[in-house]
Amino acid sequence: MFFKHWPVLLVDDEPDVLSISKLAMKNFTVYGLPLKIYTAASKAEAIALMNDNVEVGCSLAVAFLDVVMETDSAGLELCDYIRNTMGNSLTQVFVRTGQPGLAPEREVIDKYDINGYFTKMEATENKLYSLIKSSVRQYLAYGMATDTLELITQLVVATGSRRRISYALTSVCGTGFDQTDTPRWIIIDGVLLFPPDETDAEKTMTILLKMLMAREGLNLSPEGDKYVRDEVSGCQLIHICSTASKSEVSFLFSSHFAPPHKIVELMYSFTTALAIAWHKSEES
C-alpha cells in the first residue's frame, strides 16, 4: 500500500534476455507506479541478492526465473528456495525457459508453487505487460489481505487493554522507519495515537484531517463511515463514526497511488475492527 515502485526480479544467464526484458518493461506502470527491475545471472547470484537486499528479500512483487542456468534445474531450485527456504508465498513467481523439453509445463506446475510458465519465444512485450499488470495486482491484494487478517487477529487478542492495542498498532503508524514519505496517523475519540516529536507534523495532520472530514467522500456504511482521498496531496482518510458499539476512529494516511476499491475495503475492515476493540477496552 505504501510502495513507491514495484520491485521485479529477472533471473537469466543470457545477458541479451535480461537486456531485452528490461527494455520491454522500462515504461510499465501499475496503479501509476513504475517497476524497479533487479537482475541476476544465476541462481546463486539471485539468492545472494535476496539475502543482501532488504527490498528484494522482503518486498519482491514479481520474479521471472529462467530454468536452465548453472544446472538444468537451477531456476526450479530457486523457486523452491523462495517458497520453502525463505517462506515467501507472496511474490508472484513465473518460470520461463528456452528449453521446455527439460522442464515440461505440467510437471513444473504440479511440483512447484509457481504463478505461471511460459517459453522465451512467448515472452513478447504484450505478454510481459499482461503478466506484470495482473501479478502486481494479485501481489498487492494478497499482501494486503494477509496483513489485514494479521492485524485484526492482533486486535482481537489485545481487546480489553488499550495499552496492548496501541502496541499492536506500532507496525501501522507512529514508529515505522519507512513512513517519512507516507505518514500514517490514527486518531481515536479525538486523541492522536503516537503523536510526532515535531509540532509542525502534528499541525499538518490536524489541517489534513479537517480538510478531508469536510468532504463527502465515498460512503462506507449507513452510520456515515467514509473514505476520502485528496488527489493533489495523495492524503487519504478512513473515518469510523462513533456508535453504541464503536469508538470514533480516523485513519489518516498518505500513499503514492490511489488504492483500488478492494484495498480500501480491507483497510476499512481493519479500521472498523480497531473502533470496536478500542470501545470494548480500558486503559491498562
Image (tube, rainbow, N blue to C red):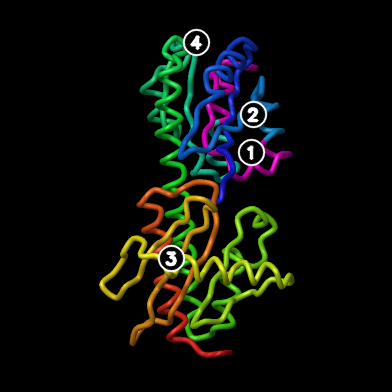
Q: Earlier in the sequence, mark 3 or mark 2?
A: 2
Quarter of the view holding residue 202: bottom right
For the C terminus, the image quarter is bottom right
> Residue 253 at what x, y percent from top left?
54, 61
Q: For the residue marked with disc 4, what is the amino acid?
A: Gly
Tell me the residue at 59%/76% (across/down). Answer: 193
Q: Is residue 56 magenta?
A: yes
Find disc 2 in the rendering and name its residue.
Answer: 38
The residue positioned 36% from the left and 58% from the top of the image is: 265
Between discs 1 and 2, the one toward the N terminus: 2
Q: Which mark is residue 98?
A: 4
CA distance separating discs 1 and 4: 25 Å
Q: Residues within 10 Å of mark 1 (few under 14, many from 20)?
A: many
Viewer-nearest of discs 1 and 4: 1
In the depicted view, which residue is nearer to us: 62 or 87? 62
For image coordinates 40% across by 79% down, the residue present is 276
What percent of the width, then of the height, locates residue 26? Answer: 56, 23
Badge 2: residue crowd in 10 Å (few <14, some 14–19, many ≥20):
some
Whether the residues at callouts 1 and 2 have beta carbons within 8 Å, the answer is: yes
- Please tell me whether residue 149 belongs to the stretch shown in magenta: no
Q: Which residue is mark 3?
A: 238
Q: Label 3: how many residues lie within 10 Å, few (<14), some (14-19) or many (20+)?
A: many
Mark 3 or 2: the one toward you: 3
Q: Is residue 245 left or right of residue 98?
A: left
Tell me the distance, in whole angstroms, between the alpha carbons under discs 3 and 1. 30 Å
The image quadrant that residue 183 belongs to is bottom right
Residue under label 1: 56
**Range of magenta residues:** 50-78
